[in-house]
Amino acid sequence: MKRYRWIAVVGAVALTAVLSGSSAYGGSSGPAQGGPITLGVLTPLTANFAPWGLQVRAGAALAVNEINRSGGVKGRGQGRKLNLAVADDQSTNTSAAIDGFRRLTQQQGAVSVGGIIGSGIGLATTRLAEEAKIPLFLVKSGNNEILTQNSRYTFRTCLPAAAMVAQSVVQLAQRREIRSVGVMIADYAWGQSFKSSLEDAAKSTPNIKFNIQVAPVPTTNFTPYLRAFGDVSLIVATGHPPGAPLVLAQAGQLGLKAPVVGADGPWSLTAKSAASSAFGRYSDFKCMATASKEYKNLAKRYLRTFPQNEFMEDDAVAGYGYVKIVAEAISKVGPNSQRIAAYVHAHTFNIPGYAWPLKWTAWGEMIGSRPQYAILTRGTPPERGLNTASTTFWPRVLFKSPALAPYRPPS
């Protein structure tokens, strides 16, 4: 139990939560002044997107425990501890997400909610957040329609809008001088939003042919769709997050040599699902800067606390960042949801491990986002402590995207 000793300073409930996956993390050892301040995490802990959500929860828990260990939220937070209340949105269950959001905010008193992964969940909960005037932080929920020009309480924190991601993919194809691209789309909110965005972006590059195939979200056999691609030089699985590892593995089984661009999925999930076919062929755009000193320091602390996760994904970095952002806001303006949102809008946040400073438009889209493009590489990382003994991969960064212009929703 030695590696968890430092967590005990925030109380037995926090220690139990970190080890068992309970729905509450953080303060329980007695606040300095007043009770603990609750932050909500609404994220998938079951079904297809659970690998994303479990990382978000762990990253947020790490931040809460570090803040509590140092004496709680300072300034206007008056030294109060943080409590992390967690709800499972079951990946694509909008009813569970709506119930979870209301339980977190109305029953448990969360001053903010973060951790949203699925686009359908983002669409459902953003409306609730805007009506309740409670800050909502999206991690991977990239549907273009989630934000409107009137959004004031919703913030993207890792994955940009689909229109911006599509532009990154087109830039990649241009950079590699690729002329034929196969695109796999999942038939749900994110997939369709990415599909329409890619079709729009492709209009400016008539020399590149995009063959788009649409498959249901639960699909496990992608062979018919891959055969329909024909002879392509690049396969884009960005529009089908749960299927990306299988797309990679089955493309290899068919003898397709084209590299595969992923869907902002966990590196560890792809490495396990696709095995040897992943190394040197699977690449992705991420919001974390794995080569930075800040990421390395953060990842080492994360893996000492959560060694079962093997690797600190960008979902965990985003979960950590969500808590740090709200904690800073509370220290300046107190635990008032509307004031927290106003503070976030007015400031730029340099979060450890991020590939760019976080700053937002009036409607909550990221300004200056620069995803890092990396390829899954076999072997150990360049520094000890950045993965566990059983991890046999490392994302090697190839380049950093030019700053993406924020997507502006239609009026």
Image (cartoon, grey):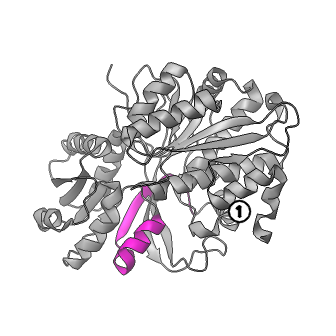
Residue 62 horizontal/vertical position (percent): 69, 53
Residue with the mark numbered 1 = 301
Range shown magenta = 267-290
Looking at the image, the residue that sits furthest to the right is 32
Quadrant assignment, res 215: bottom left
Residue 398: in sight, yes or no?
yes
Residue 400 horizontal/vertical position (percent): 46, 55
Residue pictured at 41% horizontal, 48% vertical: 91
Note whether 286 is above or below 269 in the view shown. Answer: above
Residue 163 horizontal/vertical position (percent): 32, 40
Front-lying residue, 11 or 215: 11
Residue 397: in sight, yes or no?
no
In the rendered image, residue 288 lying in the magenta stretch gets the answer: yes
Residue 288 horizontal/vertical position (percent): 54, 55
Q: Secondary structure at mark 1?
A: helix
In the rendered image, residue 45 lying in the magenta stretch gets the answer: no
Note whether 270 is above or below 36 in the view shown. Answer: below
Residue pictured at 42% horizontal, 54% vertical: 49
Left of 277 or right of it: where is 83? right
Identify residue type, mark 1.
Answer: Arg
Left of 151 or right of it: where is 24? right
- Label 1, residues with CA under 10 Å away: few <14, some 14-19, many ≥20: some
